[in-house]
Structures are given as C-alpha cells and as structure tokens.
Image: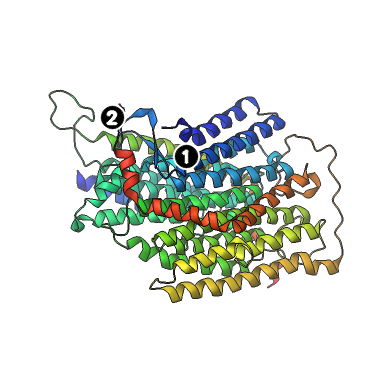
C-alpha cells in the first residue's frame, strides 16, 4: 500500500489553503507555489502510472479501516491515466493563465485552481460512491469560483445558470445514491458490485431506476444531449484558461459512466443493457448537435464549446459499446479530445485577446495573425478528426470498434456526415477570422502595458493582449498541448496498447472487487 | 408514517421543480432549497423507517435504526447549505451587475447587429 496514492488529493488540498492564508497579496509567490504544486502533481501521477502499469489494482484504505466500512481509494490503469491527463492539462493551462495575465484579473485564481484539481483527482481515485459525490461537490464549488473569475455581467449571468443546473444535478446524484443504498445496503463500489451481481432478476426494478438516475447525473456532467444545455454559455463566458481546464470536467462524467457501468452494472448483470440502450442514441444526438452547433454559432467561445460537445458524442459512442475494443478506443479518444479541446479554448482566448471580442465577424487583421492562424489550423484539424493528427486515428478506432455493432450504419453515417459538417464549420470560422480580414488591413497594435509586473488588478471580463505579461509563455503552453497531440499521433501504437490493457482491466471487475474486499487481515 | 413522509417528499419535490423552472433567481434559489429538503428526507428514509430506535448499538435494545443514512443526510445538509450560500452570492452578483434578476441571458449575449434581422 503506497501512501502516494492519496497524494493527488492531499497535495492540492494543502497548497490551496497555503496560498489563501499566506500569499494572498503576493501574486508572484502564488504563481510559484501553484505551478510547483501542479508540477509535483504531474510527477506523482507519472509515478502512479508506473505503479498501476503492473496490472494490479492498488487499494488505499483511509485510516486503515476495513472495507466496505471505511472509505477506499482505488488506483487502476484508468484512474492513473486520468490523473496524469489532469495534471498535464492543468500545468499547461496554468502557464497560459500566467502568461496571458488571466490570473491577475481577480482574486484567488491559483487557490481555486488547486481546489479544482483536488476535486477532480479525488473523483478519479475514490472507490466509494458517496465519497464520489463529495469530490464532485468539491470540484463543482471550485469551478463556480473559477467560472466567474474576472467578473462581468455576462459571466455572472452564465454562472447563475451553470450553478443552478449543477445544483439540480447534485440533488439527482443524492437521489441516485439513496436508491442504490436502499437496494444494496452499501456505498462501497466493489461491495455494491458483488451485491448487484447476487441480486435475483425479478427484484431489480429499483436497482435499474437507481442505475439510470446515476447515468443521468454523469450525463449532466459529460454534457450529453439532452442534458447539455448548461455547457455552451458556461464555457463561452468562462475565462479562456478556465474553459480549457473544464475540458477535463466533462471527462469526469465520462469516467463515472465507464467506472460504474463496467464495475457495478456490467452488461451481463441484472441491469442488462439498460445503459447501452439509452447511451448510444444520446451519444449520436450529442455528436450531431455538437457539430451542427459549430456551424450555427456566431461566437468563437461557443464554437469551441460545441466542438467539446461533439467530441463527447464520439467518445460516448465508443463507451456505449461496452466491449473491450470499444472501451480501448474510448480511452485513446479521451486523451486526444481532452488535449484538443483544451488547446482550442486557449487559441480562442488568444483570438479574443487580440481582437477585443469573440464574435465571429469580419474585423481588421489582429496582431500576430499568422502565428495564431497556424495554431488554430493545427487544433482545428485535430478537433474535426482529419489526418494526420490523433483525432483521425481516434475516430478510426471508434469506427473499427463499432464495425460489428447492430447500429453500425447509424453510427458510421453520423460520424462521417458530422465530421464533414465540422470541417466546413471550422474552416469557415478560420477563413473569416484569419484570411478575409487581411483585406481590411491591420488593426492598431495595443500599447504595451507599463511595467506589467505580478500584481492584482480590478475585475475585467476580457483579457487584452496589451496587458499580457509574458505572451511567449501563453504561446508556448498552447504549443505544449498541441505537441501532446502530435506525440499521441506518433506513438499511437504504444498508446493504443496501453488503452487496450486499460480496457482489459476494466472489463475484468473481479480483480478490482477482490483487491478491495480480500486481504484485510491487518486492518482495524 | 410512510404516507406522511412520502407525501412530504413528493410535495417538496414538486414545489422545488416548479420553482427552479421559474425565470427569476429568487424563485430558483427557493426551489433549490425545497429540492434539497426533499432529498434529505428521501435519504433519511433509505435506511427504512424505524421510529424511536437508537442508531448506535446498546445493550438491552433489540431494534436499531440504520445509522449510515443519518450520517449521509448530515453531509448532504452541510453541502447543500454551502451551495445555497454560493448560489445566493452569485445571483446577487448577477443582479448588481445586470440590474435585474432574470435567469435567461439578456440581449447583449447576441452578436451586435443581429437585432435588425
């Protein structure tokens, strides 16, 4: 039992309060500690990946209490991978926030950032259903603060919608847990899996209701149609770096669905195919509405948000197969879509910083047009799934995994047609912003801010290029995310082997269950 | 007892759902509160209804009530209380910045120049 398993929760939980208590007025110290904390988190996540790569499911019993009475943290390949993805994305985006000056547009950016990381990491690690709810609330309450960072009327109004929607989702989560507890009498996920499997088929009405309620909760988080309505205006109005970090938040919902419906409600158990029957149509509609939304919107923030919804659709098509092959494709596409969505949100923010707003309309050429255009071009290719980047490989894998499915015609048709729509929409947006604007001539270059040192500034809704303290850092962090996509493409073979091992582990839940419930002789 | 509790949960949920579908933040906040009361009562009932029984093992007592839902309800109350405080602050902020307490997005959320169409 390695104590480092709990480090991804404890580390941000210590650094966050330290930043609030001791470094409230010193932005430089905040930046140093926060970046160091996230880098350390990435190191720990890397170590945990090596630990999980042995193939054994690791258990951390909090307080050394025996399961199912104490809370357990679980580390398997999927959890370790999600931790690493979170840490890498957070580190890159944090550098962007510092380089673009977003983190000094309001108070407590870095503290909230750490709390957000604590919630996300906890949700990936926990092996207890109620503990999962608590970590969901931690990540949500931090995200409410981050989402309205910088203030402004639009952002606060979108924030009210976001918080209202998610509070309703949280009450639904509690209802689902209540139903599941009343049927199984346990909240430990491994123990619940055992009891669900032992349940006679005629007694499962309540259990099915609980399973579907739980799926709805995760679908709200993952923004599956028709529960996606909170996402576009939230992500479009959130500060760019925050929206980029939120790319991992929708994946928390996807993770929840993968975890619960491979471990507790596997497809051969009493709940049968209730999850797949509902998930697949929802995923197809999510993909279609996401890609059509890219075409329909006239706001670049919403463009990125709808692209994120579309990628969730593709991801859920693979998840809804509930086969090892489908899950492996989902794991690969999950890594890709998180990096791609994060990069796209940052690039949209770069455009906003140079143009002054995010409306998709003809305007004068912004400064640094060529560089931003190149970055946008790369990210757009990755997002829509054109060769040569990993989006293409990911979509190919998803289509391969669904080749033998009964709904294969629908799935392939939706993926291919919506990809065409997305290509058209992304290239239209790019040509309006970068290409046609050349005819109108250059915009006046904003004056560089005098001595833009590390200091806090009053709230502002848009971060202009003029007061970015280190623009090269912002560009470098976007390049870092895009190079992640390139690496995922170049090393697609090893990445796919890792994804297949992850899927194999997920579809063999007995090892997970026995790791929790057996070998407890030395516990209290 | 069962009828009382289940009708209370049902009424609170119905009122809560109606209120969170309103377009003013005050009604939405009230609806959230009602909904969380309903859920707290519901969680309380998931350990089955036992009247006048202790939740902790005692000698000489045969009937016990399930202690876990009570702990869950306690956690849920604390969290929903904190969340209500956050949503009130956020709604106040939007009211002060925007001048009204409507939940839907105002016209300024549309692209400038769209109004002529």
| Residue named by callout 1 | A51
Nearer to the camera, A342 or A3: A3
A48 versus A171 height, above or below: above
Spot occupied by residue A508 in the image (x, y as percentages of width and height): 35, 52
Q: Residue at x 57, y 52 (%)?
A: A247
Spot occupied by residue A490 in the image (x, y as percentages of width and height): 62, 57
| Residue named by callout 2 | A521
A68 versus A476 height, above or below: above
Viewer-nearest of labels 1 and 2?
1
Spot occupied by residue A88 in the image (x, y as percentages of width and height): 60, 45
B62 versus A127 height, above or below: above
Q: Residue at x 23, y 56 (%)?
A: A204
Quick one: SS at disc 2?
Answer: loop
Please state if A112 lies on the left or on the right of B33 as rendered.
right
Spot occupied by residue A518 in the image (x, y as percentages of width and height): 29, 37
Please state if A407 lies on the left or on the right of A287 as rendered.
left
Quarter of the rendering containing residue A299:
bottom right
Q: Residue at x 32, y 44 (%)?
A: A513
Are the residues at dot 1 and dot 2 in contact (C-beta closer than 8 Å)?
no
């Amino acid at each position: 039992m390695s104590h480092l398993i709990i480090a991804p929760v404890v580390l941000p939980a210590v650094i966050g309060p330290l930043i609030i208590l001791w470094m409230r007025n010193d932005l430089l110290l905040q930046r140093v500690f926060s970046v160091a904390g996230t880098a350390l988190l990435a190191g720990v996540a890397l170590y945990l990946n090596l630990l999980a790569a042995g193939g054994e499911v690791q258990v951390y019993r909090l307080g050394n209490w025996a399961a199912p009475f104490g809370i357990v943290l679980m580390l398997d390949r999927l959890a370790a991978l999600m931790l690493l993805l979170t840490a890498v994305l957070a580190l890159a985006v944090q550098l962007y926030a510092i380089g673009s000056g977003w983190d000094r547009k309001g108070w407590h950016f870095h503290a909230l950032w750490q709390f957000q990381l604590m919630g996300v990491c906890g949700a990936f690690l926990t092996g207890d259903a109620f503990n999962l709810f608590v970590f969901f609330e931690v990540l949500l309450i931090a995200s409410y603060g981050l989402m309205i960072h910088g203030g402004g009327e639009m952002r606060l109004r979108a924030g009210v919608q976001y918080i209202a929607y998610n509070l309703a989702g949280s009450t639904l989560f509690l209802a689902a847990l209540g139903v599941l507890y009343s049927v199984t009498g346990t909240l430990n996920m491994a123990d619940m899996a055992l009891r669900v499997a032992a349940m006679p088929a005629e007694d499962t009405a309540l259990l099915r209701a609980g399973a579907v309620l739980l799926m709805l909760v995760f679908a709200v988080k993952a923004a599956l149609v028709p529960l996606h309505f909170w996402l576009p205006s939230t992500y479009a109005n959130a500060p760019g770096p925050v929206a980029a970090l939120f790319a991992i938040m929708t994946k928390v919902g996807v993770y929840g669905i993968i975890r619960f419906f491979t471990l507790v409600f596997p497809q051969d158990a009493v709940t049968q195919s209730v999850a797949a029957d509902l998930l697949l149509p929802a995923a197809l509609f999510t993909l279609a509405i996401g890609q059509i939304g890219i075409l329909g919107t006239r706001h670049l923030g919403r463009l990125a948000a709808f692209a994120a919804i579309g990628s969730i659709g593709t991801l859920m098509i693979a998840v809804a197969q509930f086969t090892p092959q489908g899950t492996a494709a989902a794991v690969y596409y999950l890594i890709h879509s998180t990096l791609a969505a994060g990069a796209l949100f940052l690039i949209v923010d770069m455009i906003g910083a140079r143009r002054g707003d995010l409306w998709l309309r003809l305007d004068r050429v912004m400064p640094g047009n060529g560089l931003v255009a190149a970055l946008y071009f790369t990210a757009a290719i990755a997002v829509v799934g054109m060769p040569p980047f990993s989006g293409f490989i990911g979509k190919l894998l998803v289509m391969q995994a669904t080749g033998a499915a009964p709904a294969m015609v629908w799935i392939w048709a939706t993926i291919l047609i919506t990809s065409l729509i997305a290509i058209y929409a992304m290239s239209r947006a790019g040509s309006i912003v970068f290409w046609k604007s050349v005819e109108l001539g250059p915009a006046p270059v904003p004056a560089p801010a005098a001595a833009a040192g590390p200091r806090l500034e009053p709230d502002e809704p848009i971060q202009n290029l003029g007061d970015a303290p280190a623009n090269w850092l912002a560009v470098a962090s976007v390049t870092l995310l895009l190079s992640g996509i390139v690496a995922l493409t170049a090393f697609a073979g090893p990445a796919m082997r890792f994804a297949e091992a992850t899927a194999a582990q997920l579809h063999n839940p007995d090892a997970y269950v026995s790791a929790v419930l057996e070998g407890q002789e030395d516990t209290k | 007892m069962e009828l009382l509790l289940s009708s209370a949960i049902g009424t609170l949920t119905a009122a809560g759902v109606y209120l969170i579908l309103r377009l003013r933040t005050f009604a939405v906040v009230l609806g959230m509160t009602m909904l969380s009361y309903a859920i707290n009562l519901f969680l309380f009932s998931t350990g089955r209804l036992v009247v006048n029984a202790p939740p902790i093992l005692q000698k000489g007592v045969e009937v016990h009530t399930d202690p876990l839902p009570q702990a869950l309800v306690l956690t849920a109350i604390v969290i929903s209380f904190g969340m209500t405080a956050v949503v009130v602050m956020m709604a106040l902020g939007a009211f002060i910045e925007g001048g009204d307490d409507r939940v839907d997005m105002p016209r300024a959320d549309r692209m400038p120049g769209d109004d002529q169409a």
